[in-house]
Image: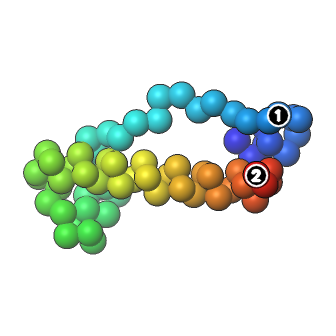
Amino acid sequence: VREVLETVPVDGLWLDIIKPKDCSCRWCRERMREEGLDPTNPRDRQLNGYQVILEFTSNLSKMIRSIKPV
């Protein structure tokens, strides 16, 4: 995304299929334990997936706005 914004004169980008995942990889399990969630609980894994997506989109938006302010 950074490379496109820095090299191509675009007004915006469309990122498709960014959705939460029910993940239990070691990093997600560690994150869930740190957040007080139970990696064996499907609802907690789903909640973690939503939290990861919210954090990702927030960080991505900040990076985009640092390159192309609104």
Is residue 7 in view from this perspective? yes
Left or right, 66 with respect to 57, comes to: right
**Residue 21 placement (x, y as % from top left):** 32, 39
**Residue at horizontal 73%, vertical 36%?**
12
Q: Distance between the residues labelled 1 and 2?
A: 13 Å
**Residue at horizontal 74%, vertical 46%?**
2
Left or right, 4 with respect to 27, comes to: right
Viewport quadrant of the N terminus? top right
**Residue 35 placement (x, y as % from top left):** 26, 69
Is residue 25 in view from this perspective? no
**Residue 13 placement (x, y as % from top left):** 69, 33
Dot 2 crowding, Cα within 10 Å, few <14, some 14–19, many 20+: few
Task: Give the residue type that dot 1 points to.
Answer: Val
Task: Give the residue type that dot 2 points to.
Answer: Val
Of 67 and 3, the residue lying toward us: 67
**Residue 52 placement (x, y as % from top left):** 39, 53
Callout 1: SS: loop
Structure colour scheme: rainbow
Of 25 and 52, the residue lying toward us: 52
Give the foreground label among 1 and 2.
Answer: 2
Callout 2: SS: loop
Q: Mark 1 points at which residue?
A: 10
Q: Name the residue under label 2.
A: 70
